[in-house]
């Protein structure tokens, strides 16, 4: 279950409240506020609060560049200009706060982004719920195919079934033992009066890395886009990419001009090395260039050809 | 002039706008929103936007500590507890954005706080207004008395008048020469067609450090309090302390429970070294302790006696 | 096994190398360089590199405060002064790099300190070794006694044995299944040619949180002390405190004057709230003060009495 | 004068000292250690300390990616790969510390890079030396030509002479008044016993922005390269670019493989938007594309043509 009935009631209460404000407000994001977007089998991401909008980015840029920015006729043009020239500070003037429920091994990747504020549910002080991530069968296949081993075999059929059975059985068993060692229920009530129970801070070590945790994660717009550029990328692991994808939707609602510039200048953009640029110039000039003549390593050559959509 | 007529009109427009939101809203701060609080002779600080409130701090702590925090009966108690035990992450969940107009030498102290987002008016791209800070006569006296020289003389009378005349005359002259070198008015129109004019990025170097600049400054609640604990402190230079004082007022309106805990556990608090604590214990036990017997250096002894409100 | 024979050989090679340098060098720390200090059952922490020494702190302070600092006669006095008055930037001028092997649940606490650089062994790309943390029996007892439940019972005897058996058996089983799902050995060689194997990035989710990981962790002296003040504290979980304790030893060798000031002004220091300070003043004046008359909450009163070493 | 005789003696003493170390050492950088590289008329940048080398980057990457990285045959290849794919954390494992003397208006740009440690000479506590930056005549011309005004006129001849005279005269006068108001010499001795003098923290406001200040600046290799990519860029103001250029030389000595990858993948690289990439593909396919058909704005079209070295 992604959301408990208690959480559902809290969400509905938060959604029904209304207040008047003088602050910049974004109706398209307000619609989504507090509502969990389902991710993976039990996870979610939901926007809890936000500050600023596209106009706040523009306003900050105009403070910075003063009268100079008046020459850019409209907001979209200015935002495109800022994105293109990596003038990042105006984007830092907006802030968003998410509530995320995610498997621990995903949380471990996510937390490497240090320029954000985090409050995570603490298994040192509280008992974790019995919820763990089990991949969908097609994910076993897809991810194994991309595996470093480079073997073409797809993980499916009996082996796939066996893997899912193992993941489920091990999570069940380790959680069951966690609960037994704690000797308390979720409300903190002792289960068996004849036993003393293990400290929560120790018992948690028996849980597997697919156990769900949750946190509040607050970040400014610039650093959110940096996160998304890495985690919504095709090279990111599927299990974190689906969170980034859901957040991309919130980005589009929140700051549509910025989101559009982000897609053009970041997500869909290409980075050419000095050597790669020189190859591109020769190709445009009609020259036939192969890897040997390019001065690029084989790996770089392949990456460049992929960028240019050419056969290797 | 602190605020131009154009700025005044913009402020009034921003203040009169209203929107409906589902976000946490703080009416006491909304009243103040956009309104400049005057600081020094031409400076100001004004709240432009905010995110979260006292309840957001509590909410983040409860996510972190989970069921454990239910034992603290009320929000004020929990916020006091977090402040006392330096659990700082829940305070990072609130954010505030200021627009500040301030002399450059103050901006240079301020910017040392790196955990904030800044967009400053750029004299590389725009022409700075002719506004500079001149201290009030009583500040000349007060600050000179605290001066490192340790001489008791107060700077007043003729010497004070002379100092103010110098500051004013030098600012007038350097600004006048700045404008002449630029050879353009504030709107970018060339003043003298027979001259080419100096680049803005170079001309600005002729301005004195009391010239006013302005910026947007965005910070989370935890880092705001860290800033205030250093800059609203009696040891801070008067010219930055008055900004911190104005911001303390916005803190009280925004997050009254947090502001109250901050005053008790930070602003009015005392930090005792291990040796200092041992002296305190001996004093409580009724022992007569002097500096020699204390194990403290003379300077530390004096600081401890000052903390305890005792004569040295 | 804490260190493999291959690692031992690498360490010995690194230790035997010598170079001449013009940089500040600390012989007492050089002795320890590269050598693992054993922590927990399979963990370690070892210093890999460092930059600066006590004199670098002093030098940075003298650049900052200029001729003013000449009034402080010696380095120790200046370092004490900086520490006492929380002038933190000179301490940021020194840097240290550790290689740490630690259980994942400890790594999850540790990584919350964001002001450091980290490179962690990636289970997305590589196979984790079969090493997991099992607490010593006395730790089960000690930590359960401090447990939130507040029951006095000590976890020992049969229940303790049962807990250790569970932790060991579950770690063995989940690691065994991890290896089976991977279908490759540590060298990346396929174990069973008839199966395709699960991607490493997915298989790792079956591991328990007491599995060991490792990382390089680089931090400046100021932030190292902040980390130590929180993690070498009595309230920190035992499993991270033992790492902090080992690092305290490296601190003493590296920057003895700073380490001494740190112990006096941080580790052994006391923080009094405004209200707590007022109670202390009344106690010194010989007044009898009880909780009711103190204006403190019961919890604060107890904390203050504990600080002052008085019976409640 | 860039360096005083006292400083020269200190530098020579530091350079002549030698110690034995087990740490990674870079002879090519050791040669340069402590030696000021002259920048502008009175400024300098000098390396004071460093930690790590190219091998430390490789070592950190191998800890991160484990056995996976063994497939990259050599260090240069791995460093190129890390740079190309923006795997930044291994570069954070090296650190360098500079001592920089620079005009205040340059310091104000520089300090915007927040991910570094700084200790600046404090004019609040100490008296600044009488040293100010005066541009070379060819800089007046070059920078005015690039000026926003977009007029082709070059600032030279009489107007240029007049500008230099103004800058010099205003700096002389404001410094003279600063000294008079302070009523003390650099050693802190009172000049005129009949006057009390103005506090240093106030007197400094009369100085112009071309006055020299100095600081220690410590940064990791990743953030140093980020700084250089912005400040050694052709769009950076000349007065900060010359510092970046000098630091590029230290980068090449310190970490030659990283510096080479940095030049190929950053300094000489091109960033194409999704739309720009699509234009490039069409050009390579031999299609004639003009701005209208490109889907790019005029400004973007010009930037793309400049990148590709084509006439507009």
Image (cartoon, coloured by chain):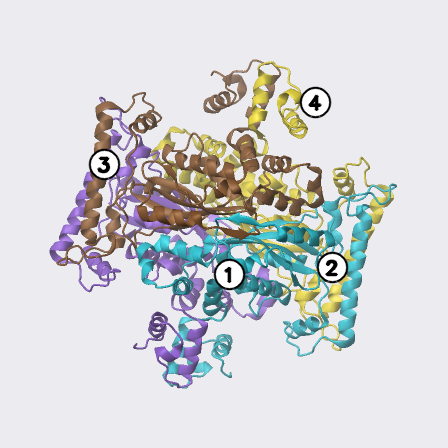
Chain colours: A yellow, B purple, C cyan, D brown
- Indicate which label's residue lies in the foreground, 2 or 4: 2
**Which residue has dot 3 on it?**
D168
Q: Is residue B143 left or right of residue C196?
A: left
Instruction: Pinpoint the chain carrying mark 1.
Output: C
**Residue at mark 1 to residue at mark 2: CA–CA distance:** 30 Å
Q: Circle 1 is placed at which residue position?
A: C225
Residue D262 x, y percent position in the rendering: 54, 34
Residue assigned mark 2: C1
Residue density around tag 4, few if under 14, some if 14–19, many if 20 or more, within 10 Å: few
Query: Farthest residue in the left direction?
Result: B158
Front residue of C116 and C208: C116
* Mark closer to the observer (4, 1): 1
CA distance for labels 2 and 4: 50 Å
Whole-percent x and y of residue C34?
Answer: 62, 55
Relative vertical location of residue C16 with respect to residue D285 in this rendering, above or below: below
**Can residue D222 be seen here?**
no
Subunit bearing disc 3: D
SS class, disc 2:
loop
For residue A311, the mark is 4
């Amino acid at each position: 279950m992604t959301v408990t009935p208690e959480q559902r009631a809290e969400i509905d209460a938060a959604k029904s409240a209304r207040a008047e404000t003088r602050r910049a407000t974004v109706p398209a994001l307000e619609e989504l506020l507090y509502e969990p977007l389902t991710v993976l089998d039990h996870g979610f991401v939901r926007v809890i609060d936000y500050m600023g909008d596209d106009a706040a980015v523009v306003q900050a840029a105009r403070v910075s560049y003063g009268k100079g920015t008046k020459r850019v006729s409209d907001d979209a043009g200015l935002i495109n200009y800022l994105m293109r020239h990596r003038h990042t500070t105006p984007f830092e003037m907006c802030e968003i706060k998410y509530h995320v429920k995610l498997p621990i091994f995903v949380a471990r990747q996510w937390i490497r982004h240090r320029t954000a504020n985090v409050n995570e549910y603490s298994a040192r002080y509280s008992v974790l719920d019995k919820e763990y991530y089990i991949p969908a069968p097609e994910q076993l296949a897809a991810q194994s195919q991309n595996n470093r081993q480079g073997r073409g075999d797809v993980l499916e059929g009996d082996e796939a079934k066996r893997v899912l059975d193992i993941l489920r059985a091990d999570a069940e068993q380790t959680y069951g033992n966690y609960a037994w060692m704690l000797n308390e229920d979720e409300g903190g009530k002792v289960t068996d009066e004849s036993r003393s129970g293990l400290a929560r801070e120790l018992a948690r070590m028996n849980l597997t890395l697919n156990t769900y945790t949750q946190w509040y994660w607050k970040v400014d717009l610039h650093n959110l886009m940096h996160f998304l550029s890495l985690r919504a990328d095709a090279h990111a692991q599927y299990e974190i990419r689906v969170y980034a994808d859901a957040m991309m939707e919130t980005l589009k609602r929140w700051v549509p001009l910025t989101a559009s510039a982000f897609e053009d200048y970041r997500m869909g953009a290409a980075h050419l090395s000095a050597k790669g640029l020189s190859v591109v110039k020769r190709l445009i000039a009609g020259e036939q260039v192969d890897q040997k003549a390019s001065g690029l390593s084989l790996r770089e050559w392949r990456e460049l050809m992929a960028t240019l959509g050419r056969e290797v």
